[in-house]
Image (tube, rainbow, N blue to C red):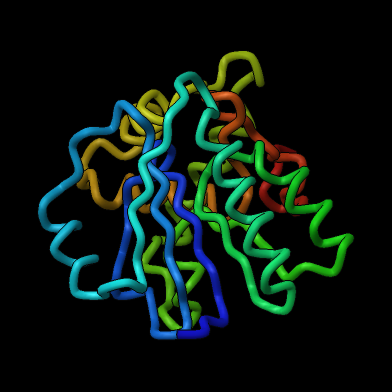
Amino acid sequence: MNYEKYLYIDYENVQDVQTDAIDETMRVMIVVGVNQTKVPLQLVQQTQRLGEQVQWIQVGGQGRDALDFFIAYYVGRDVCLRPENEYIIYSKDAGYDPLIDHLKNEKVNISRIVSFQELLPRINSAVDKALLEKTIQNLTKVAPNKRPKKRHTLTKHVAALFPTKPTIEIEGLIEQLFIDKLVYEQNGLIRYDLEKLPPRNKKK
């Protein structure tokens, strides 16, 4: 079957795979690290229903960002074979961006997403905008060298701002920060790009 879109999932970086966002036009490769020997049974069952449309690929190599090189290989291979198609990398790691920028300059239709919500633009985000803005304002007031450097510490930081909110709502706020490209991962650490905020979100 000829597919219009190719999706590469960096499963070491993101494990939230939502099969309902995968339509019949999409070919999916879930790239797994050598030490990732446990995959949720529910996810396996969901991807099995999609048959050959979804391929699990376990690769060798260890160390931070090891999967980046393998995904770069698969992207390059497929672009050479099908330059007219659309290519999507699902990862919160901004280390892919120089490759993506280079391929865009070569007229390749490629992008990086940080959430499956980006594949479903018709669905409105359920994130409370007031809580999101309060989270952003709080982070702008924290000195750059004092901001959380790991996903779990960022989660704890945001949870402390809203102690009565459930975990799923806190995770939704953090996910939106990634979608808005206000935070990203690089070399295993959380980085911040808060200078792109409009003036109303910055401290006066």
- Where is residue 17 drawn, in percent x and y? 32, 58
View extreme (top): residue: 145
Residue at left offset 22%, top offset 33%: 37
Q: Give the residue displayed 61% in from the left and 30% down from the top.
A: 186
In this picture, is 108 found above or below 170? Answer: below
* Quarter placement of the N terminus: bottom left
Badge count: 0
Q: Is residue 199 left or right of residue 112?
A: right
**x, y (%) of residue 126?**
36, 67
Q: Is residue 75 left or right of residue 30?
A: right
Of the 4 image quadrants, the one containing the C terminus is top right
Residue closer to the observer: 175 or 104: 104
Out of 177 and 94, give the one closest to the viewer: 94
Residue 67 in percent (x, y) is at 51, 36
Left of 197 or right of it: where is 91? left
**Residue located 28% across and 32% down the image:** 36
Quarter assignment of residue 21: bottom left
Left or right, 184 with respect to 102, comes to left
Q: Residue furthest right?
A: 105
Q: Nearer the viewer, residue 23 or 85?
A: 85
In which image quadrant can residue 167 be found? top left
